Image: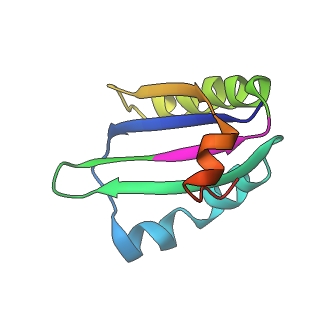
Amino acid sequence: MTTLLQFDFPFDGPFGEEMTTALQDLARDIAAEDGLIWKIWTENEPERRAGGIYLFSEASSAARYQAKHQARLESFGVTGIVARSFSVNGPLSAITRAPL
């Protein structure tokens, strides 16, 4: 069953185009993760937060990545990390045009 993983954490930037430029290598690394179907990058500059919504092909890949990414963020000094994992209801999501 596909699994959705959500990360949200305090982030001092960069945001927007500067984020795009600065984090391209990280994006390529994430794209190579086993079981990753896609990631949506999230940023909220006024609230100084960032994160992402990830879709994995199975729960074990999502759990492995959650541990890896949380450790990576903590190694950068990030605290207050919120990570949540959800099973995806495919039939209902298809009705509402989810890109599954």
Q: Single out the residue that lies furthest toward the left.
A: 46
Res. 62 image quadrant: top right
Q: Residue 90 occupies which quadrant of the picture? A: top right
Taking the spot 40% from the left edge, 76% from the top edge, the residue there is 17
Instruction: Locate residue 81 relative to residue 12 in the image: left or right.
Output: right
* Residue at image location 23% in from the left, 58% down from the top: 45
Q: Is residue 48 left or right of residue 86?
A: left
In the rendered view, would you say 12 is above or below 67?
below
Q: Is residue 10 magenta?
A: no
Residue at position x 63%, y 34% from top?
Answer: 88
Q: Does the magenta stretch include residue 56?
A: yes
Q: In this view, does 34 lie to the left or right of 8?
A: right
Specify the segment rendered in magenta: 52-57
x and y percentages locating residue 59 in the rendered image: 74, 25
Give the x, y percent position of residue 5.
Answer: 57, 34
Q: Which of 52 and 18 is in front in this view?
A: 52
Q: Where is residue 18 drawn, in percent x and y? A: 39, 72
Task: Tell me: 67 left or right of 12.
Answer: right
